[in-house]
Amino acid sequence: MPRRLRVLMSAYACEPNKGSEPADGWNWALQMSRWHDVWVLTRANNRRAIEHVPPAGGPGQLHWAYFDLPPWARFWKRGARGIQAYYFLWQLAAWRVGARLHREIGFDLFHHVTFGKYWVPSYLSFLPVKSVLGPLGGGESTPRALAGAFSRRGGWFERRRDLVRRLADLDPVLRATMRRAGIVAATTEESKRRIERLGAPRVVVEPQFGMNDEEFDFFGRFPVRTEKPFRLVSIGRLLHWKGFHWGLEAFARFHRACPESEYWIVSGGPEAGALKQLAAELGIAHCVTFWGRLAELAEVYDKLAQADVLVHPAAHEAFGNVCLEALAAGRPVICLDTGGPSLQVTEECGFKAPVGSVEQALQSMSDAMVKLYRDPNLRLRMSAAARERARVHFHWARKAERMNALYEAVCETGQTVNRQKVHDRSC
């Protein structure tokens, strides 16, 4: 039996019954306490949500340490840009809290989980213990052939994002963080390459998110549709890099050949007006429904349940949780062959459009729509394969087993570590 470790986990975002980063922090804490005693350092703002759920964990122990910057510094949290500044300051100040905890407890390992972006250093990794970082993303970029297909605002955002990452890569603290890490888990191959260039000695690919049994059971109850109209759906904030304009253009080509079809777009965002105008220009406004931002998550899932296929043509994304939800619901996924979605989708459960050019991507997505429209048996086969793939590769329990193998490899617990298991990609 490997020995139980005392683990300090940094989870700035950590809340139960939430999605995205808060769910990531919560689930890693919960899962790793199956084997180890875990102290989770998180924001004091998360305390009420955490303490309103029954105590959970495994044979190990789960402890909570809450910390926030003083009130005078919290103006940094205002607005999206302020959140990033506040997070940086929180990471900087959290070192003192972690150092005090280490003097009291004597940790064997430090694990940084949220925020899961590679380009902001975790100062807690400079504690005198071994460390595991990640899964970390943010290294994903728009494929070069698609980079010019954004609006002026979108193009400016992409240039600014690239500049921020290039400057961050020069940060000696970030480079030292990566060099000190025993193992870094990267969300995608793109992030893996960037992290390796920063000097990390050992990087493996581990997708960011997962699901538990309750979630799989929920999505598993979604019936597979066979009636008309054939319905495609895209779900996510209407941002330029989500690529919904490519979804509309591909659908326009498809709809000309298969008119008994419609396209639903769920959520809102700054590109809503431009997307509606594009639908009108393409002559498909009558068969495209923009549902806007729905008040309840249940309403979003109801739209997914009423669709046949998810279209998710994001240009760069570390994971794409909606793709996992669609797979668990038995919906084939059409995505671009890049970023996190390309790790989730295989030819058995969806289609990955090549990104050699905009024309190639659009035609490939349109062809995939036609195949799924004309072959209901193909949809049924892909539906079953999608559910199987989601449960086998993205179950939180299995993800935790892979992470525990990394813990063992870093800490050399005396157990013979299956090196192949450590190095294998999860999917």
Image (tube, rainbow, N blue to C red):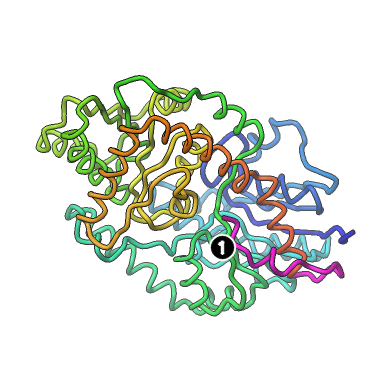
Where residue 141 sits in the image (x, y, percent)? 36, 62
The verdict on residue 53 being magenta is: no
Where residue 185 sits in the image (x, y, percent)? 59, 63
| Mark 1: few/some/many CA within 10 Å (<14, 14-19, 20+) | many
Quadrant assignment, res 99? bottom right
Where does the N terminus fall, quadrant-wise? bottom right
Where does the C terminus fall, quadrant-wise? bottom right
Q: Residue at x 35, y 40 (%)?
A: 311
227 over 274 or under it: above or below = above
Q: Amino acid at mark 1?
A: Val
Q: Residue at x 59, y 61 (%)?
A: 425
Q: Residue at x 29, y 46 (%)?
A: 365
Number of marks drawn = 1
279 over 409 or under it: above or below = above
Kindly identify which residue carries mark 1: 205
In the image, 165: left or right of 116? left
Where residue 353 sits in the image (x, y, percent)? 33, 52
Quadrant assignment, res 374? top left
In the image, 281: left or right of 42? left
151 over 222 or under it: above or below = below
Q: Majority secondary structure of the magenta segment?
A: loop
Along the line of sight, which residue is nearer the eye, 255 or 124? 255
Where residue 359 sits in the image (x, y, percent)? 19, 55
Quadrant assignment, res 205? bottom right
Magenta segment: 410-427
Q: Residue at x 65, y 45 (%)?
A: 396
Along the line of sight, which residue is nearer the eye, 159 or 276? 276
Q: Quick one: SS at disc 1?
A: strand
